[in-house]
Image (spheres, rainbow, N blue to C red):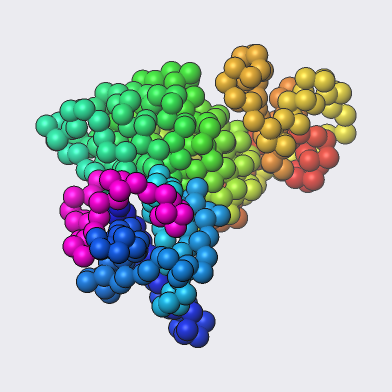
Amino acid sequence: MKMACSVRVGNRSLPNQAQSKSKHIKSTLALCKHPKNEEYYIILFSGLSKNGTKYTIKGNLKNVLTKFCAEGKATIQFNEPPHDLFIQSDTIQLKCFLNLFKRAIENKIGPDELTCSSLDVQPINRNKLAPKKMAIKKGSKYPPKSFPRTLEVLYINDINLCSLDRGVLQLIKLKVLDLSHNLIEFLPYELNRLSIKELNVSHNQMGKGTLKQWNWVDGCLAMSLVTLNLSHNNLIFVPDQLVKLQNLNTLHLYDNNLTTLPSGIGNLWKLRVFSASNNRLVTLPGSIKNWRLQSLDVVNNNFEPVVQNLPSSRISKPLPIQTLKECSARAVLQHKIPYPLGSIPKTLTLLLDHAKYCVCGKPCFTTYIKHPHMLLLNNIAETINSLSGVMSYVPIDCYFCSLKCFNHNCIS
């Protein structure tokens, strides 16, 4: 049996400092047996050992570490030579290899199961391996049946694609998906099952989709997504569900028709790059006061130019007592309790999805104070794209979950 993998060879006879300099190299591990004495061997082929390094198995194993096998990692330690093979591979392939390896150690392999001879074994031809990256620029290049399950990066551009192929939704290893320059109006709900890190849907027609068709912003995707590009889509809104993307680092919303942004968008704590230029924004959510961005671009919107903050007065009248529904809903969002589709009544799902967010980051629903404010953009970003300094200040709509928050943030 042969397995394509990455292997780092650690030599225990060397000092620790020398061992730490070794790196993982694309390799082939072959489990085979000698045709005469029936002994089993592991042979390692790599760029450093093209002819292969042979390791005897019988009486030569120091340890086999499989604690992280589910992550595609394992370590095989030999006595002679004193090498540790740190293996990284596809999870399924690794489990199959280790299963056969265990049976070889126990001498429980049938005569016809392992036909690979240690005398003529060859490394796997890398050109014949299933691809990890695919780029489709023409409709004629689109796979007629299905996509390789090994894909981690997929580009489908400029082919007038109207909907996402169900085959894409089965690519569990996918990390980068680029669907830019197509005719896509919405993405399927099942997309939230994938752990994609980069999603580019720019230059499509997502603006024609309904609010219900944004339910893909959930699940595994909400936890994994780091970069999202929704530019050039004629969007008139983006859903409040965007606040679920807690690991989002980069968000592009430029060149759309947006008039507002989700109230809780400032709760994207890890966001570092945000662009919403060339829209029709009149105000920004007050929650963005929490941002600490590296780059911010909101030029060419409908903000009224103001050069200083507007004064605000204190409110001494207490807010109404929160209802049990309000208290419960606030607790669900504050403690990040998941509420999968169908787990609670739809009316409650809608209530939670469309919460207002205080500048302190806490959610509120019916009990709050709303107050306009002016924000100096330099307070939330290191680099700002502006037109001759005209947009130093922007108006923000602030929600305050309590009188305490209001008086703390709006000092007359």
Residue closer to the observer: 228 or 274: 228
Residue at the spot 30% in from the left edge and 36% down from the top edge: 179
Residue 256 percent location from the top left of the image: 38, 33
Is residue 333 visible in the rendered structure shown here? yes
Residue 369 picture quarter: top right
For the record, the magenta segment spans 101-130
Residue 20 percent location from the top left of the image: 47, 77
In the picture, the quarter occupied by the C terminus is top right
Give the vertical position of 402 relative to 311 (above or below).
above
Residue at the spot 47% in from the left edge and 75% down from the top edge: 79
409 horizontally vs 154: left or right? right
357 horizontally vs 242: left or right? right
Residue at the spot 25% in from the left edge and 46% down from the top edge: 130
231 horizontally vs 307: left or right? left
210 horizontally vs 166: left or right? right
Residue 75 percent location from the top left of the image: 47, 63
Magenta-span inclusion, residue 127: yes
Residue 78 picture quarter: bottom left
Give the vertical position of 195 relative to 271 (above or below).
above
